[in-house]
């Protein structure tokens, strides 16, 4: 688990699923021109996490952009995969939520699993919330 997520977990929050960029980013032209430093930095610095309370997406190495959405604020997670992406297990995640307008993250490893884990956590959240009322 990445350092940003470790430092920003709230009380009783646990990481359920974490992913990063797919290895395909090492085959991009920008990766070759930077002697593979760019994909190494991306893979080690960017975090895509589902917890039992929210999703956390942190991008950036020197400057930082974060999206932290409580489960009840996530409106949808879209997954786009080309045929090549489906065969190799990568795709684009689009996060839509209250206050967040369609952020897209490309070449994410196993995006369908990310979406499935998020849906499972949302279901558990709504079931637990129903028992508290």
Image (cartoon, rainbow, N blue to C red):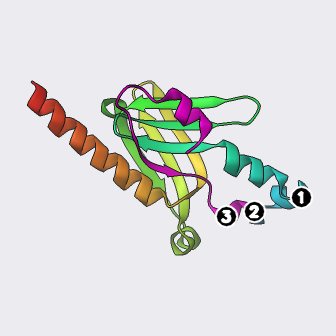
Q: On the rendered structure, is 125 left or right of 84?
A: left
For label 3, the residue is 23
Location of residue 58 (image quadrant): top right
Residue 125 to residue 41: above or below: above
Indicate which disc, 1 or 2, sits on the residue closer to the N terminus.
2
Q: Which residues are magenta?
A: 1-26
- The label shown at residue 107 is none
| Residue 24 x %, y % | 68, 65
Q: Secondary structure at mark 2?
A: helix
* Outermost residue to the bottom: 87
| Residue 129 x %, y % | 17, 31
Q: On the rendered structure, is 62 left or right of 93?
A: right
Quarter occupied by the N terminus = top right
- The label shown at residue 35 is 1
| Residue 95 x %, y % | 46, 40
Indicate which disc, 1 or 3, sits on the residue closer to the N terminus.
3
Residue 37 to residue 125: above or below: below
| Residue 33 x %, y % | 90, 57
For label 2, the residue is 26
Q: Residue at x 51, y 70 (%)?
A: 86
Depth check, front residue: 87 or 130? 130
Q: Secondary structure at mark 1?
A: loop
- Kindly check if marks 2 and 3 are in contact, taking CB atoms under 8 A apart as contact: yes
Q: Mark 2 Cα within 10 Å, few/some/many (few <14, many 20+)?
A: some
């Amino acid at each position: 688990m990445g350092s940003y997520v470790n430092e920003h977990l709230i009380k009783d929050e646990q990481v359920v699923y974490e992913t990063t960029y797919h290895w395909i980013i090492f085959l991009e032209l920008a990766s070759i021109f930077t002697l593979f430093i760019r994909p190494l930095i991306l893979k080690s610095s960017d975090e895509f996490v589902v917890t039992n309370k929210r999703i956390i997406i942190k991008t950036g190495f020197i400057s930082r952009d974060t999206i932290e959405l409580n489960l009840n604020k996530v409106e949808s997670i879209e997954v786009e995969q080309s045929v090549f992406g489906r065969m190799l297990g990568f795709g684009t995640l689009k996060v839509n939520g209250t206050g967040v307008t369609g952020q897209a993250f490309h070449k994410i490893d196993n995006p369908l699993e990310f979406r499935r884990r998020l849906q499972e956590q949302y279901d558990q959240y709504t079931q637990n919330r129903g028992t508290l009322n």
